[in-house]
Image (cartoon, rainbow, N blue to C red):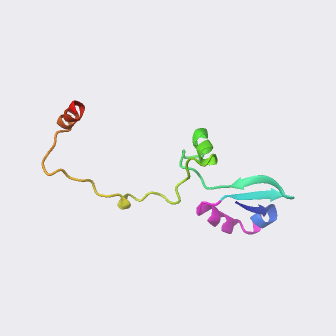
Amino acid sequence: MQRTSITEAKNNLSGLIDRVRRGETVLICDRNRPVAQLQPVGLGDASGAEAPWLASLVRDGVVAPAGKPLSLRSLPKPVKPARPVSIVDALRADREE
């Protein structure tokens, strides 16, 4: 986490915002005392507020935020069955096993 003074933050705000876009967090200090934190907006909701349980999992190191958004083009194509299959029949067969 980068630390910066209020004066440096004012003078270099665009650069700090670029760092935050890349996923970094910036701590802004006033006379070496932390007063604010710039961090990437979470995916929790439109306001950027994450669910408290998710924030605690990130804080505890159980999960990590994504480095970049998921591209649907990177997902594998769905597998097509050789012949038509009834979902109901497949479910029944699965339950019988």
Residue stretch rendered in magenta on the structure: 10-24
Residue extending furthest toward the front: 97
**Residue 97 drawn in magenta:** no
Q: Position of residue 11 (x, y in %)?
A: 76, 68
- Among the 4 quarters of the image, the one containing residue 50: top right
Residue extending furthest toward the right: 31
Quadrant position of the N terminus in the picture? bottom right
Q: Position of residue 77 (x, y in %)?
A: 28, 57
Q: Position of residue 40 (x, y in %)?
A: 61, 55
Q: Position of residue 37 (x, y in %)?
A: 72, 54
* Foreground pick, 46 / 65: 65
Residue at coordinates 74% horizontally, 57% vertically from top-left? 27
* Foreground pick, 60 / 12: 60
- Among the 4 quarters of the image, the one containing residue 73: bottom left
Q: Is residue 54 left or right of 95 when viewed as pictured?
A: right
Residue at coordinates 85% horizontally, 58% vertically from top-left? 32
* Foreground pick, 7 / 52: 52
